[in-house]
Structures are given as C-alpha cells and as structure tokens.
Image (cartoon, rainbow, N blue to C red):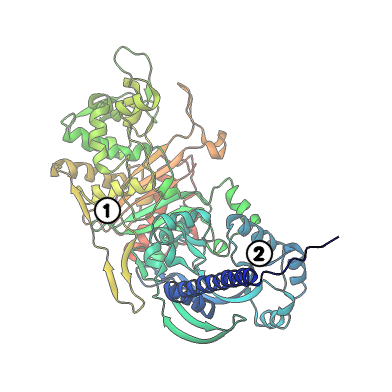
Amino acid sequence: MSRTVELRNHPRELKNFQLRLAFSAGFVLLLFLLLFARFSYLQVSQREHYHTLAEANRISISPIVPNRGLIFDRNGEVLAHNYSAYTLEIVPSKVGDLEALINELATVVEIAARDRKRFKKLMEESKRFESLPIRTRLSDVEVARFAANRYRFPGVEIKARLFRQYPKGESASHVVGYIGRINDKDLERLEASDGLANYRGSHHMGKIGIEQSYEKELHGITGFEEMETDAAGRVIRVISRTPAISGNDLTLSLDARLQEVAEKAFGDRRGALVAIEPATGEVLAFVSKPGFDPNLFVDGIDSENWDLLNNSIDRPLNNRALRGLYPPGSTFKPFMALAGLELKKRWPRHAINDSGYFSLPGSTHRFRDWKAGGHGIVDLHKSLVVSCDTYYYGLANDLGIDNIFDFVSQFGLGKKTGLDIEGEASGLLPSQEWKMRRHKQKWYAGDTISVGIGQGYNLTTPLQLAFATAILAGNGTAFRPHLVKQVLNNNKEVVREIAKEPLYTLNLNPDNLQAVRNALIDVTQPGGTAALAGADAAYVFAGKTGTSQVIGMKQGEKYVESKIRERFRDHALFIAYAPAENPKIALSVLVENGGHGGSTAAPIARMVMDYFLLGKLPTEAAAEAVEPNEEEDEHD
C-alpha cells in the first residue's frame, strides 16, 4: 500500500509568520502610541492640574484666626476681652472607641463629669468631623503630662486658643451677649451670606446681643500660612504668610457704672430699666433682671447650668427690656393727655367731676377709678398728678380708638424702635383693623375705655416706653436709640462714629406740651403719686407712675395685694426724665409683680438719676426703701 507524503509549504508558512509578526509589531506599536498619548495628556494637557495636586501634598494651607475685637463702655471700661489658654481637643473621626479613649485620657488629665456632658452636647450640635474640646484652660503641669503621653492618644492634641471673657459677669449680660461654638445652623447662615471662607479655623461667633449684631465688625479677617511639609505631614518651612486682621473694637454708649447702680437698685426683683439720652438717642443703661453669666456659654454650657437657666421660673435668659411685653398702665396717660389737647377734645382748664367711676351712655357697667369715691373736680393737670382713671375713661371715649392709635403711635409705642441689637419685640398698640385681623371681631366702645388707661390690649416693652419718654423730654424730636457709639481699629483709631440719627420731629403745640410736662413735674412733688421718690431731690424731675394688672378683677372686687400670690400681683412702672427743664436722661422702669409704681419703680429711677446727675451712689438703706409699703402707698 502506497502512502502519500505531504511536503511542508515553506513559502506559505513564511508568509503566515510574516503576517503574525507584522500584526504583533503593529499591536505593540499601537500600545506604545496609546502609552505615548496618555503620557502626553498627563504631562502636557493635565500638567497644571497634577502640579497643583503634587504641590498640595507638599504644601499645606493653615488659617490664621483673627483676634476678636474688644467691647468697652463709654468710659473705656472693658466689657468683653480675650485671653489665651491651652485646650485638650479630640477629633472624633480619628477615634474608634471614643468612650474608652476619654476614660484613658482621664488617667492623664482630669476630666470631670461636667466636661463629658459638655463634650457630648458639642458633638450633637456640630456634625462636622472637627476638633472638639474635652477640657479647656489646662495648667502647664497638665500640658506637660499629656505631651509625655501623646503617643498613646491618636486623634487627641493640645491647642492654644483665644478665649472670650466678660469681666463684668452678669452685669449688662443681655446687652453685650456672648459668643458660642459655631453649629450647623450658623454654618448654613454663613454659607448663605458668602461669609464661610472668612471663618476657616474659627470655632466661635456671636450668639446674642452686641456680640451677635456686630459680628462682622468684631470677627476680623482670617489670614493664612502656606507651609512646606514632608511625607509625614511635618512642617519643613513657611513659604508665605498673610497675617490675619483683628476685629474692630466697639465703644458702647452704655455707662457701666450707671448700669451697675441700676442693677443694684433692683436688688432681687425681676424687671427692666432703659435709660436714654434724649438729645442723641444714646442708651445709657439697659437692665434686664435677673441676668446670667455669659462666661458660661463661651466653651459650650454644660447641661446642669443650662437646665438651671432655661428652666428657672425667673427666666434669666429673657431680655425683658427688649422683648418683655407689658401693659403700660398709667404711664400711657401723658400721651393720652397730649392727644386730648392736640386733637382739641380737651383743654387745660376743662374739668370733670369724678365720682369714682365712668359708664358708657346706655350702659350700667361701671369702669371704676382706683380711688373709691373718686377725686372730685379734676382737670388735665390734676388728672396726671393723682393719676385719675375716670378722667381718661372719658377722654378715651371722646377720642375714639382710631385717633388714639394715630396719635400715640407717633411716640413709637406698638412698633420697633430700631435699636441696634437683634430680637426687639414690636409691642401692641391696638386698632379696629388689628382686632378684626387678629380676633375676627369688631371693636367695641368698652375696648377703647380700657386702652385709655394703658390696659386692655395695650402691650409695650420697657425700651419703647423709654423711647416715648425721650421724645416727650426732647419736645417731640425722636432720635433712633443705639448702643454702639464708636467703631475703632486695633490701633484705637476711630473707624466709624455712630452719629445721632434724628428720625422725625412731631408738630406739637408748645403750650400743650408744656401743660403736660408741668403736670409730670408735679407728679414728683407733694400730693403726686411719685412724691416719695421726689422727696428732697437736688434737682427737679418729671415722671409718671403706672400700675398694670396681671390678672383681671371682677366688677366691684377690691385688689388686696397681700391676698394675691406674688407672681399674679400688679406690675409697677415709672417713666421719668431729668432735669425737667433741660433733660439729660429719660428712662423707664418696670418691676414685675412689684405692686405700685410710686413706691417700687419710682425709687429705682431716683437712684439711677441721682448717680447720673450727681454721682451719688445708692445706700443699702435707700435700696431697702424701695420695698413696697401697701399702707403708705398711693395707687396710680
């Protein structure tokens, strides 16, 4: 059997080999071309991008937090300043078992239960993975002890921080305010206002008062350092430095000594006092009692102190002078009297026979005067001196609510004054339109009667009463009240002067204005409701007492203070200005549940005016004399 022998086809094999070789060479060439293209893209097109990334690995940008501006009173006394101290801080994102770490830290540096609670509260308020203090104000010994053990605590470090301090403590706390740690809500506000970049490295900002309202002035401008670092993140050298610009200092119109005198005059009572210079609108004193210690908030207030402040029945965190709403009571009567004269519903010699009550035509309901049996023949002058309710019942009825609203609102009651701190309440000067909008009810004649003596729907703040009194003292000229007097740079050069800002001047008949002012002087003389406060004064001052009801009384029911729980007793009010002929100070005083204005609020005003005009400090005996004596006191 024959076999066929297949011979190899060398030309075909050579051709196939050459094809495979060419394909392989082409494939390799393509890979090289792709690699070259990629290299070109990275080295040429993306050079700047990757150069920046490389530099970022080598160069670190560190913010320089500016020093916060200081706050002074009008005489240069420090109300807020800074000091440096060490803090022990934890970055939670770098720690596994946080509780175990804190327990271990406590063996090196003392960490109290209060510190733990505050740290937990800070973590809840700030969800960022940032450095949070577990201990502040470390001693040198504690710093050295931690430094020796630092290797045991990754994510924990010692930092030098500037701390805010308020040397006056509770005094003027509602005015100055405080700073606190920046939380998520603050970050959102900063981001919305394009201010976030200026807060890199900052951990605190103003929360209330001047600290909040003048935050932009006080914070300053953040600087930065450009530093070269090694692979381990250690600084090799500083490449460039842009220094931070410290925040501006503020000089307030507030007189710290006068503020302290006013606060001392209140003693343990709750209430508010606002004193204004009528010719400029500068606020001289701004008291809300009780106050609080703003130093508690700087590091983040612990839960124990927060509960004490927040749940206190005395509400120390409530700014009564700015946001407290109270019926003005008889302090409303001078403005009613002026309205009666200006709108020609009354004239100075016009008199009524006060039998102790007023009734609307066709009604048997009696609106009673505070004095049983009445005051007899009463003209406008006497109506203010003895604070006759019946006179103002009739006047209110003759004026009508629309005229009352239109005239009295010119004195700033029922609307914000424009004071330069946030949170001011508007108060309420009622009108027909307001009642229909708010209560869906029409206005009744009886509503007007109550408004006439500063009761009913009437609500005002102590700030508004002081503002209205300043307008009265200034012959009808209104100046915007303000607390900041000057803005200074860190070289103590005046950057901006807060000039007096006249808002408007009321077109009042000088004779009508003088008639009311003469009556207010006699309020402080023998026979007047503030005679006790005006006794033996070295200067003549004008004033008006007021008592505002907290709870309603039934028809014919007699108010007996000793039989009513303290929190339900009447509020005591007093407005005043001095000296009467050339006023330098106008003020309002409110004592919560203080009873009668003549015996409780007016003596406080007298002590404040004595110090402001004479430099006379109140004595303990004078402060005790403020205690109301129901048997000797005249109602108002």
- Could you tell me which residue is drawn at 75 percent across and 62 percent down? 99
In this rendering, the answer to whether 53 lies above or below 563 is below
Q: CA distance from mark 1 to mark 2?
A: 48 Å
- Could you tell me which residue is drawn at 22 percent across and 30 percent down? 403
65 sits to left or right of 574:
right
Q: Position of residue 377 (x, y in %)?
A: 26, 28
The C terminus, quarter of image = top left
Give 377 or 412, whichever is nearer the viewer: 412
Residue 151 in view of the camera:
yes
Do the residues under discs 1 and 2 have CB atoms within 8 angstroms? no
SS type, badge 2: helix
Q: Earlier in the sequence, mark 1 or mark 2?
A: 2
Q: Position of residue 144 (x, y in %)?
A: 68, 83
Q: Which residue is mark 1?
A: 480
SS type, badge 1: loop
Give 371 or 25, whichever is nearer the viewer: 25
Residue 66 in view of the camera:
no
Q: Position of residue 69 (x, y in %)?
A: 41, 71
- Amino acid at circle 2: Pro
- Could you tell me which residue is drawn at 34 percent across and 24 percent down? 436
Q: Which residue is mark 2?
A: 92
Give 172 or 487, whichever is nearer the viewer: 487
Tell me, for residue 140, which label it has, or none. Answer: none
